[in-house]
Image (tube, rainbow, N blue to C red):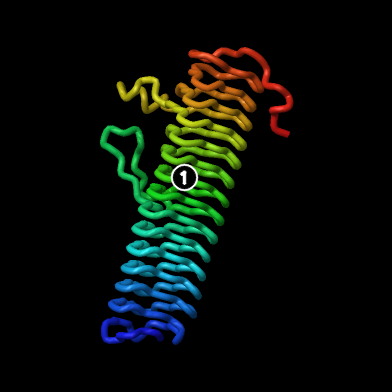
């Protein structure tokens, strides 16, 4: 054990750690804690009962790790990070300062989370919202090799495939399914109960409404807006008919376009920038205008294999 002032430490007698662990002043180590070789704890870290920290993991100053947490080997947690009870953080994950990882979040290996982010937070809807609370909401689950930028908010109950990229300031709500290699651009909002297929790219500042399905290899340009409520919050009918758009495989939606509730954008549709899509499109067709109209086929060389 390396420490210049052991009198400033509180370490349970049941904690298990090798001599290579470095403790900074004012750390508190709970019962049954297990620390691997070459773990480094910054000033004022609080490690609660039953926590396991893997070999070579480094914690910054004033990191709080609640009971039952598992931290993989080679992780780096910045100062003032908070990790909730029973969360799992995979090996070689980097977490920026002042980030909160909520209880039971399950994060894969080789991840990166920027500063001031909230990962796995619990939803709380407004009384008049169409979103209904679910007491049995599962925890957030993240695949391997992910990136989540600074000031990202990811709610519990959503699962993410491997190598997902989420830009600064983005938000993803509960009960979504995000496929592998998906890109969600900075400032984009993805509402609840939405499915996004593999290799889809959603660029900066988009609004992806609740109850949508976006298939694989879709491209959505910046500032696209989608809608799901033709009653715009009026009458009880809206709860029955609320529905977001369905965007088929390989479709492309141009910048600042608008998709109205329930429209079906067929596979390989090309929606030009600024278009208003009011009705279903046909496969492999170019849509232009306000409202959008079908003008020509998509060139063969632009189609996916």
x and y, in percent, of residue 297 in the image: 68, 17
Q: Is residue 70 above or below residue 174?
A: below
- The residue under the point 46% across, 45% down is 167
Q: How many marks?
A: 1
Q: Is residue 252 above or below residue 1?
A: above
Residue nearest the viewer, comparing 103 with 25: 25
Kindly indicate the quadrant of the structure image that contains residue 88. bottom left
x and y, in percent, of residue 213 in the image: 52, 34
- The residue under the point 32% across, 25% down is 233
Residue 37 visible in the picture:
yes
- The residue under the point 35% across, 62% down is 81
Residue 137 visible in the picture:
no
Circle 1 residues within 10 Å: few <14, some 14–19, many ≥20? many
What secondary structure is found at the residue carrying circle 1? loop
In the picture of the structure, the residue carrying the numbered disc 1 is 167
From the viewer's perspective, is 38 left or right of 126?
A: right
Kindly indicate the quadrant of the structure image that contains residue 49. bottom left
x and y, in percent, of residue 130 in the image: 34, 33
Residue nearest the viewer, comparing 89 with 152: 152
From the viewer's perspective, is 198 left or right of 28?
A: right
Return the residue found at the far front: 4
Considering the image in quadrants, where does the N terminus appear? bottom left
- The residue under the point 47% across, 42% down is 176
x and y, in percent, of residue 103 in the image: 37, 59
Q: Is residue 96 above or below residue 290?
A: below
Residue nearest the viewer, comparing 17 with 173: 17
Considering the image in quadrants, where does the C terminus appear? top right
């Amino acid at each position: 054990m390396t420490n210049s002032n052991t009198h400033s430490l509180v370490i349970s007698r049941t904690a298990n750690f090798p001599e290579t662990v470095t403790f900074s002043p004012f750390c508190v180590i709970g019962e049954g804690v297990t620390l691997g070789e070459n773990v480094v704890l910054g000033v004022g870290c609080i490690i609660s009962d039953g926590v396991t920290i893997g070999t070579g993991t480094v914690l910054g100053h004033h990191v709080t790790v609640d009971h039952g947490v598992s931290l993989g080997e080679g992780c780096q947690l910045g100062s003032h990070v908070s990790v909730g009870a029973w969360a799992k953080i995979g090996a070689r994950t980097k977490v920026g300062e002042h980030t909160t990882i909520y209880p039971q979040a399950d994060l894969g290996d080789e991840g990166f989370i920027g500063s001031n982010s909230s990962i796995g937070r619990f939803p709380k809807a407004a009384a008049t919202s169409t979103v209904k609370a679910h007491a049995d909401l599962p925890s957030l689950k993240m695949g391997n090799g992910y990136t989540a930028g600074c000031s990202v908010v990811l709610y519990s109950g959503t699962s993410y495939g491997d190598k997902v990229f989420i830009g600064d300031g983005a938000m993803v709500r509960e009960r979504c399914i995000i496929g592998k290699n998906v890109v969600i651009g900075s400032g984009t909002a993805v509402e609840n109960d939405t499915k996004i297929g593999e290799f889809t790219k959603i660029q900066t500042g988009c609004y992806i409404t609740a109850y949508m399905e976006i298939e694989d290899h879709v491209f959505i340009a910046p500032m696209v807006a989608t809608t799901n409520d033709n009653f715009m919050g009026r009458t009880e009918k809206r709860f029955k008919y609320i529905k977001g758009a369905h965007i088929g495989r390989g479709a492309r939606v141009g910048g600042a376009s608008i998709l109205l509730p329930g429209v079906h954008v067929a596979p390989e549709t090309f929606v030009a920038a600024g278009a208003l899509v009011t009705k279903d499109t046909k496969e492999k067709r170019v849509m232009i205008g306000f409202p959008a109209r079908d003008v020509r086929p998509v060139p063969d060389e632009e189609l996916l294999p």
